[in-house]
Amino acid sequence: MSNSPAASVLPAASATVDAQTDARWRVALRNLFPFAVVGALWEVTAHVGVFPRRLFPPLEDVVATLVRLTASGILPHHVFDTMVRLLTGFAIAAVVGVAIGIAMGRSRRAEDIVLPLVSIGAPIPGIAYAPLFMLWFGLGNVGAVLLVGFVSAFPVIFNTWTGVKAVKEIWVRSAQAMGADNRRLFRHVILPGALPYVLTGLRLGLAQAWRILVVVEMLAAVPWGLGWLIFGAREFLNTDVMLAGIAVIGAIGLALEHFVFKRLEDFTVVRWGMMVS
Amino acid sequence: MTASSDRTVSLRRAAITVVIAAGLYEAFARSGAFPPALLPTLPTIARRLFDMIADGSMLHHVLYTLYRMLFGFGLAIVFALPLGILMGRYRPVERFVLPLASALMPIPSLAWVPVFILWFGLGNTVSVLIVFYAAMFPLLLNAWSGVRSINQIWLRAAGAMGADERALFWKVIIPGTSPFIITGLRQAFLRAWIAVVGAEMLAASDWGLGWVIYDAKEFLNTDVMMASLAVIGCIGFMFERVVFGSLERATVLRWGMMRMAKS
């Protein structure tokens, strides 16, 4: 269909538009179908009563809880606190990580000094540091934010370092031959050249930060936060609250991935033609 | 400057950095500016590590963690790899599973811990299931994209040479997918390793590396924490280098499907 010499005649064009909306509907339905099946299975299991309703609530209960928590402002408060922690921690990681990564990529000495320390810290899963950070910085926000920053800095450092080293030698030499001084070289050649890697690093770092933060909020006894919302609900057997919280966590994770970084990439490296979207 | 002397310079600098960092830490720890319970000296940590290894408790913790880890990881392999391959081969399976997988994937595995604790009680089941959940998605997606990335010509050629479905599967699809599967195993291992430590902290049991770190917090046993952190780091490093490295050498590198990265 796609290789027909189309679109010169108007009626044919409108027909393809119709076919397109039709196809879009079909795709949407096809994507919804598995959710309908799983949802129906869930409903049947919940209503048959094999498991107690408190532990296995039907979907309408979960949705009702979600609406109730949102309307009363409790859920937005949890989301807000979590996002503040996430963004503060991630901002620290982004600034420090990119700076260290660039230093490592540009100077052999910095690379030799930092790399062993980073390689020792990296293979330990971030969550294992959590109790240590809690002892050092106390329960609550400071420890949580620092841990998120610390953990998400590793992928940022590694990718920035690789990116700076991957800038083509010819670009650097030709810029120098054309008389670029160090600052211009950095701003116009190295930074844009390394940017696809840096963005990948930031993306991985943010995903890492998100995963760690949810657990840290469970462990660190913060008063507000999505992790605490689902962990605290355990005491009262509020499985519906937990499931609603998990749905929100998943939605935020998806949004971070799709909206924030897709946009950033479209604006920079894709527009410059360094990457195909 | 030759490459080898370049390397020795790097190595010497690396060694110096580590020594200086350790020295700084030691100076901080001994300066008395921080309570020694929070910042134990390196000899204290080493002694504690040695004690825990000597009395067998560290081995016990490690074995419990590895048991949970490998059980969950094994389940994920048995479940996700065939499903991923089916997704790559059959359109209806792909259309059914892919939307579900993309909806579940952005949920961090550890967010399920409270729900699983309610459903299955504290203990091994929770950790094993969390590991399973964490390891499943990288395996599923890599197997799927691996099968889809197989060169169509290979399939047609094998078909033309009279390969039946089974021969096609074992001789073309599995070797062709293996670089992706190994990448998937690597990613899945990293996720699972994080998940098992986190799950052990939350779903308290009596043994396990995550549990021992978390439990040490209650008694301010920072030396126990640091010793366990070192062990966790070593195991993670060993798996990454030794297990997956040799797996790669025995399969895809030997078959010439991937070249060794230049170091």
Image (tube, grey):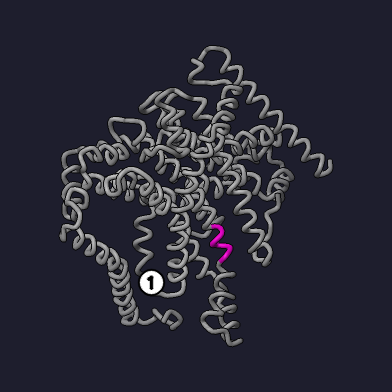
Q: Chain of mark 1?
A: B
What residue is drawn where x is 42% and y is 54%?
B132
Instruction: Tell me where residue A97 appears, x and y as whole percent.
Output: 54, 36
The kind of secondary structure element at disc 1 is helix
* Residue B52 shown left or right of residue A60 in the figure: right
In this view, the residue in front, A213 or A266, is: A213
Question: Main structural element of the magenta stretch: helix, strand or loop?
Answer: helix
Q: Amino acid at mark 1?
A: Val
- Specify whether residue B180 is painted magenta: yes
Can you give x and y, in whole percent of width and height, for residue B84 in the image?
A: 45, 66
For the question of whether residue A98 can be seen, the reply is no
In this rendering, the answer to whether B80 lies above or below A220 is: below
- Nearer to me, B194 or B58: B58
Q: Which residues are magenta?
A: B178-183
Asked where in the image residue A72 lies, by quadrant, the reply is top left
Residue A227 horizontal side relative to residue B182, left or right = left
Residue holding disc 1: B93
Quadrant placement of the N terminus of chain A = bottom left
Q: How many residues crowd mark 1 within 10 Å: few (<14), some (14–19), many (20+)?
A: some
Q: Name the quadrant containing residue A116.
A: top right
Relative placement, left or right, of A257 versus A115 is: left
**Magenta-span inclusion, residue B260:** no
